[in-house]
Image: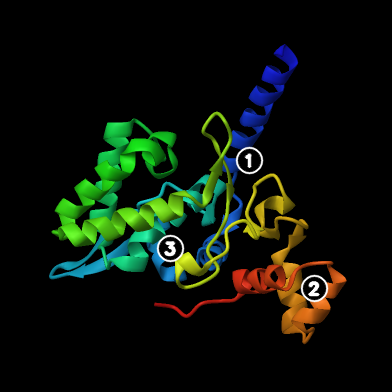
Amino acid sequence: MCDAREATIAYTSLMRDLSSRPAYRISEAAGYLRLPSATLRAWSLGRDYPVRAGTKRFQPVIDIADRDAGYLSFTNLLEAHVLSAIRRQHQVSLSKVRNAVAYLRRHLGSAHPLVDHQFATNGVDLFVERLGRLINASRHGQIEMHHLLTLHLKRIERNPEGIPIRLYPFTHSEPEATAKGTVVIDPAISFGRPVIKRLGVPTAAIAARYKAGDAIEQLADDYAAHRDEIEEAIRCELPIKAA
């Protein structure tokens, strides 16, 4: 029993370390999350906006692992994944999102409140309520926002201690259409790059062969994969149009 407990503690410590390391370029993370790079860059680094006297700067929403080099950690990737729920449904300004996140930081006492276990259990209502006030969202709009946040949170797998360990990214423009469990991002596997969960094959390798002309049927045969696994892998790596 003691050995099992020690192993769990060691694993949790390892995952915390892996999750905090700089690992993803902004453009790379944006592709995995199906977000415009400009949006994720603004969330990560802030952005300038014009005023009568010149320009001012919005502060970033996400405190990324390496701001100088522009690299996100796995934890940052999860934060952006949750924030993308708002982007998909609501054109919410960066300043209002940042204010809502700051509000959560104060109430949850967490540096990364959007991926904190408390957020997954009772912080969503608090966040939706706060953001709804900031953007004058209707009751119907708040229900939609709550639904999308919950849908995104279900894509984050946690260990028994509540530590996020895996992300199942969306591969369709409509979240409900994406099969959960086919493609996974795990900081302990393939340097945190997406893989087909059942096979451990990097999605980038499959997409590269597909772009080179290999048919889906051939790829499925070569990797002993199901057709839908190959299709999900390819979709995970396809670029999206900037919004």
Q: Which mark is residue 228?
A: none
Earlier residue among tags 2 and 3:
3
Q: Quadrant of residue 57?
A: bottom left
**Residue flagged by tag 1: what amino acid is it?**
Leu
Q: Residue at x 30, y 65 (%)?
A: 48
User: Label 3 vs label 1: CA separation?
Assistant: 22 Å
Q: Nearer the viewer, residue 62 or 222?
A: 222
| Residue tagged 3 | 41
Marks 2 and 1 sit apart, C-alpha to C-alpha, by 31 Å
The first of marks 3 and 1 along the sequence is 1
What amino acid type is highlighted by mark number 3?
Arg
Circle 1: is it few (<14), some (14-19), or many (20+) Cα within 10 Å? many
* Residue 59 seen in the current view: no
First of labels 2, 1 by sequence position: 1
Image position, residue 162 (x, y; %): 51, 33
**Residue identified by numbered label 1:** 18
Mark 3 or 1, closer to the camera: 1
Note whether 96 is above or below 210 in the view shown: above
Q: Can you say which quadrant of the picture contains the N terminus?
A: top right
Residue at screen point 39% across, 77% down: 243
The residue to which callout 2 is attached is 220
Q: Quadrant of residue 237?
A: bottom right
Q: x, y percentage for residue 158?
A: 55, 39
Provide the secondary structure element on which disc 3 rests: helix
Residue 149 falls left or right of residue 50: right
Q: Is residue 18 left or right of residue 114?
A: right
- Vertical relation: 114 (above or below) 176: above
Q: Position of residue 202 (x, y in %)?
A: 74, 62
